[in-house]
Image (cartoon, grey):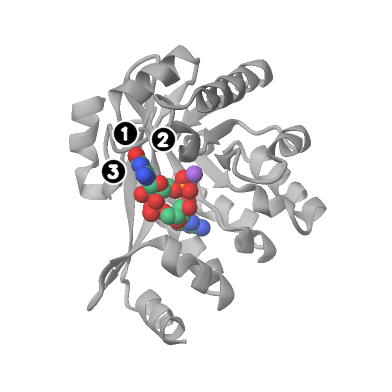
Amino acid sequence: RDMEVDLRRAFGNGEFELHYQPLVSIASDRISGFESLLRWRHPDKGMISPAEFIPVAEDIGLITQLGEWVLREACAEAVKWPNDIKVAVNLSPAQFRSRSLVQVVISALAQSGLSPKRLELEITESIFLAETDANLAILHQLRELGVGISMDDFGTGYSSLSYLRSFPFDKIKIDRSFVKDLARRPDCVAIVRAISGLGRSLNITTTAEGVETEDQLDWLRAEGCNEVQGFLFSAARPAAEIAKLLTDFG
Ligand code: G
Ligand code: G
Ligand code: MN
Ligand code: NA
């Protein structure tokens, strides 16, 4: 397909960039970190969303190199921030298949000088669907480095709860589909309450995604959620705007 050739060219041509979306602690009302979100600045088509090109990059095996670039870039950027501000990086299941993932993380930390405790790796439960034992072993090795491991899009999969038992996650990211209807749907409130309670009992931080209104923030605070992320604060912005975001919400 067209996009395959285009993606390889784009990678060689430096057309990818990372944008950063603030994670805001509910207790302190301050930025606690940023999630790095990959962007493709296409010369003709403009910005292309990762939802469109990550699956293709996975198919053609480019995700290993692209994912490595993301890790190195995010660590190199984060080391410039105040040292209580973390950076979150999304990992694709395909990066676990490459086997070099742990070495790449070690190298990205060493080269940038970023403290491992400032790096959070976001994974989705799909890494548990195949090669479960091998992937769990990799997760444990990553955690031993001192980096945080977050379960992304929590609640959307088949059996997210069982994965909480297989691995000691540091953070659960409550999928934005539950946040969207908080004000209208009591079932969404009940689900957010249950996940927050679970997080509290298991000593896992809970972060709500897709927070767009003050009303949603009020609900999340009331239900004991720890952290929020969404357009209410900011969309993902280029690295050059981080200093301003930290002044606004720091
Ligand atoms: O930024 P947002 O627009 O549109 O992201 C869409 C999807 O792409 C999300 O599911 C997000 O987790 C994923 N994504 C964003 N950046 C990366 C990345 O660097 N690596 C991987 N594997 N996924 C990413
Ligand atoms: O799957 P993951 O959570 O990594 O994806 C992050 C995605 O969520 C990105 O596509 C990002 O652009 C999107 N996003 C971030 N904040 C909001 C929000 O407040 N509302 C909506 N609808 N999407 C958001
Ligand atoms: Mn994510
Ligand atoms: Na998510």
Compared across the picture, whether 154 is left or right of 1 comes to: right
Q: Position of residue 250 (x, y in %)?
A: 26, 25
Q: Amino acid at mark 3?
A: Ala
Looking at the rendered structure, the secondary structure element under dot 3 is loop
For the question of whether residue 202 can be seen, the reply is yes
Q: Residues within 10 Å of mark 3 (few under 14, many from 20)?
A: some
Q: Is mark 1 within 8 Å of ligand 2?
A: yes
Q: Position of residue 85 (x, y in %)?
A: 38, 31
Please report the residue visible at 35 percent of the width from the left and 77 percent of the height from the top. Answer: 10
Compared across the picture, whether 96 is left or right of 117 comes to: right
Q: Is mark 2 within 8 Å of ligand 2?
A: yes
Please report the residue visible at 35 percent of the width from the left and 15 percent of the height from the top. Answer: 28
Q: Which residue carries the number 1 mark?
A: 212
Please report the residue visible at 78 percent of the width from the left and 58 percent of the height from the top. Answer: 131
Q: Earlier in the sequence, mark 2 or mark 1?
A: 2
Q: Residues within 10 Å of mark 2 (few under 14, many from 20)?
A: some
Q: Which residue carries the number 3 mark?
A: 235
Compared across the picture, whether 199 is left or right of 247 comes to: right
- Is residue 158 shown above or below 28? below
As drawn, the label of residue 180 is 2
Specify the quadrant of the image occupied by residue 249: top left
Specify the quadrant of the image occupied by residue 146: top right
Dot in front, 2 or 1? 2
